[in-house]
Image: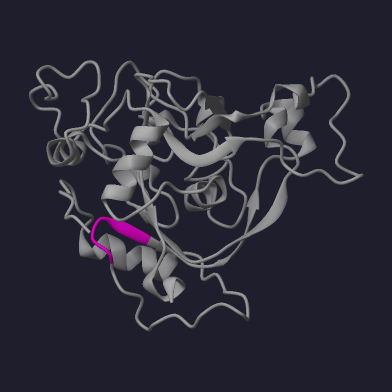
Amino acid sequence: MRSVLVLVTVPALVIAALALAGPQDVPRGDAPSRPNPIPEVNGMVFVPAGEFIMGSTAEQLVKMAEVDEFPQRRVFVDDFYIDIHEVTNAQYKVFLDSTQTEAPPKWINGDYGLGEDGFPVISVTWEEAMAYAKWAGKRLPTEAEWEKAARGTDGRVFPWGDSFDRALANNGEHLMPVMSFLGGISVYGCFDMAGNAAEWVDARYEAYPRGPNDVVPRGVPDRNLGFSKDRRVYRGGSWNTFSKYLRCANREHTAPGKRWVYVGFRCAMDPEWKKK
């Protein structure tokens, strides 16, 4: 595995506080036993196995949510690690120089702008994000992993709670460096899960499973015919979108070869004890 440049770290006191305050999920009985203590991975946080609340309710559809987030349900997610922040320009540049991969379109002569080391890399395709993750010895998170890392286990609307606060996320006029909003950190310790750059995940744009009692409220258009396995999902909203798109449950989608100036990514990784 190649080494990856990490520009910013979280102070040890912050990590310690999160470890004490964060949810203590319980793995299923057939899960491999975890080491104690959990090994630290540079630039990543650990999310323990357990169920969480994923998606949006019928009541939320009427207010703000989109029908592709319906129904809300409990989903089990196994142990995983996820990046503390979005992959930065500086990190992505190491990958480009090592693999001779094509630079994002707005980079000049294969390099990003002066002073933009700590900005999220954007205008990368889903395939390029997947290639970076593989090169780094990681992978893209699944939709469920991403949403759990963003909202925890209590079904909160935003990483910090149920009410939007513009002081906690970047949905302003331009992209900003990662970790600029310390108050918007998720319960597991992830920064910028709402706003700044939206983030590719390893998921096709498909409907959530529905049961006989999962009925879309009258007056809410049902988008069932709009799903496509040829499209890929990105999450988190971005600097140029309204607050409703920064909700943890919000799903957006596009073709995997598309580049958008507001879409970047972060990586996830399986712990060693899951690989045995």
Q: Nearer the viewer, residue 70 or 273?
A: 273
User: Which secondary structure is most common in the magenta stretch?
Assistant: loop
Q: Nearer the viewer, residue 233 or 11?
A: 233
89 horizontally vs 265: left or right: left
163 horizontally vs 80: left or right: right
Give percent across and percent down for residue 227.
68, 27
Q: Residue placed at 70% from the left, 56% from the top?
A: 74
Above or below residue 96? Residue 274 is below
Note whether residue 182 is visible.
no
Note whether residue 56 is visible.
yes
Q: Quadrant of residue 275?
A: bottom left
Give percent across and percent down for residue 84.
32, 51
Q: Nearer the viewer, residue 50 or 4?
A: 4
User: Quarter of the image containing the N terminus?
Assistant: bottom left
Q: Residue placed at 57% from the left, 74% from the top?
A: 26
Q: Residue placed at 51% from the left, 25% from the top?
A: 243
Residue 214 lies in the magenta stretch: no
Q: Which residues are magenta?
A: 41-45
Give percent across and percent down for residue 140.
42, 46
User: Quarter of the image containing the C terminus?
Assistant: bottom left
